[in-house]
Image (spheres, grey):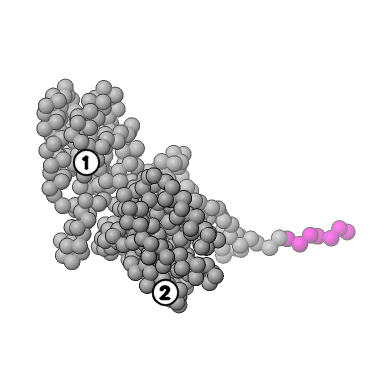
Amino acid sequence: MSAQALLCIPDARLRSLFSLLLTDSDAQVTSCNDADELQRVLVTRFYDICAITHDVSADMGALIKSVRYLSPDTRILLIANKDDVEAIIPLFPMGISEVLLQPINPKKAITAIHKMIASQQTEPSAELLDENNPDQSGGAQSNSTHRTQHIVARSASMRAVVHQLWQARQESLGVILKGEPGSEFELVAREYQSMCGDPNGYLYVLGHNEVTSEGLATAASLDRLNDGIPRTFLIRDLELLAASNQGQLLDFLRLAKRRRDRDRPLRFVFTVAECDDQGRNLDLPFIEELLFVVPVVVKIPALRDRKPDIEPVARKILIDLTALYPEYRVRSFKSGVVEWLAGRLWRGNYEEFCSYLRQVIMECPSREITLAYLTTREAAFANRLGNGIPPPLTATTSMDTMVATVGPQAPAPKPVPAT
């Protein structure tokens, strides 16, 4: 498996040199322009090596800490001038793996690159191994070559989900994802798709009106005509699927299992909410029948039960949103804010957390979200409700869309008759 390298080198000539050296070392190279883009790219996927020049940021200490936080296993290669030696000495305890001084000696650069790649491939992942949980770490060692790209998996429960998805690759028809309403079903489905060899493709989402014998057969036929990697089909909210479509789906899956194509297998991901919005368990006899055909069930734990994942999820939302909309001013969280946000997690789960945090980021006028701002905002919102004033626009999101909805409106005033 080739190494992944990320370059943040503004100088074009120097960037071309390191890109050539890394490519010759059988590494896949990705380049970014500045420190903000570097952090945004690091959130999306794992990189074995991150090469940074000393002039890329005015505060190199903060940048090194951010890189180390976002990707603890990444080896950091710092490129500096000979005049910057005294400035880079305090950076070594922060986690720098190698330092190269300009002018660059290609032979020394190649030696440093090979050394970092070799150390990366021999050491286990810090994200996947848990010293306090030997059962989980033993299971995770089998998939230590896979680094999550779409989901945050720092907690032991989510690492168990990653392990189950990795094992489910060998199944013939796919997996069933179960969890509370608002769980990150689509992100987990994309992670499963990347494990199956298609990290950059899009899920083939089938609506309930397409879950018929003809619709499923057409989708499967179109996939076979494609010469690329087999698509992953996503069917959401099985608890809402009509009874007439349930039988057609079961018949299609039974037939597909009997006629299994080993060269181009069908892969389905089904999502089902195991309870309603009030927490009452749902009685779903159809799911029990489906288990005879698709026996692999992966339960997604609620975000409120995954405390180590909450802060990385919040940082990912912040980086993604400010990358799309640079006019938003927020760039960081004050200490204690993430703990306060974690206390808000209840039945809404992941989607509610994303919705609330996105709204706060859009409305906050300062560069940093503080506890004082959040408490003032909550008090103002409570006063509006107490005075009968309708609440402001709130953002409710699925995974890829944001829709503005309005709360209950106050009754319109009655017209005064003319005298």
Residue 289, disc: 2
In the figure, is residue 217 to the left or right of 190? right
Q: x%, y% of residue 417?
A: 84, 60
Q: x%, y% of residue 150?
A: 34, 51
- Along the viewing direction, whichever of 350 and 143 lies nearer the viewer: 143
In the figure, is residue 206 to the left or right of 7? right
Residue 3, disc: 1
Q: Quadrant of residue 22?
A: top left
Residue 177 part of the magenta-drawn span: no
Say if 251 sits above or below 217 in the image.
Answer: below
Q: Disc 2 on helix, strand or loop?
A: helix
**Amino acid type assigned to the residue bearing label 1 in the image:** Ala
Q: Quadrant of residue 103?
A: top left
Q: Residue at x 36, y 47 (%)?
A: 229
Whether residue 50 is visible: no
Residue 199, disc: none
Say if 27 sits above or below 104 in the image.
Answer: below
Q: Quadrant of residue 297?
A: bottom left
Say few, some or many: other residues with alpha carbon within 10 Å of mark 1 (under 14 / 14 to 19 / 20 or more): some
Nearer the N terminus, badge 1 or badge 2?
Answer: 1
User: Given the current orientation, which residue lies at the most extreme right position?
Assistant: 419
Whether residue 164 is visible: yes
What span is in magenta? 413-419
- Along the viewing direction, whichever of 176 and 282 lies nearer the viewer: 176
- Along the viewing direction, whichever of 314 and 350 lies nearer the viewer: 350
Is the Cβ of the residue at disc 1 closer than 8 Å to that at disc 2? Answer: no
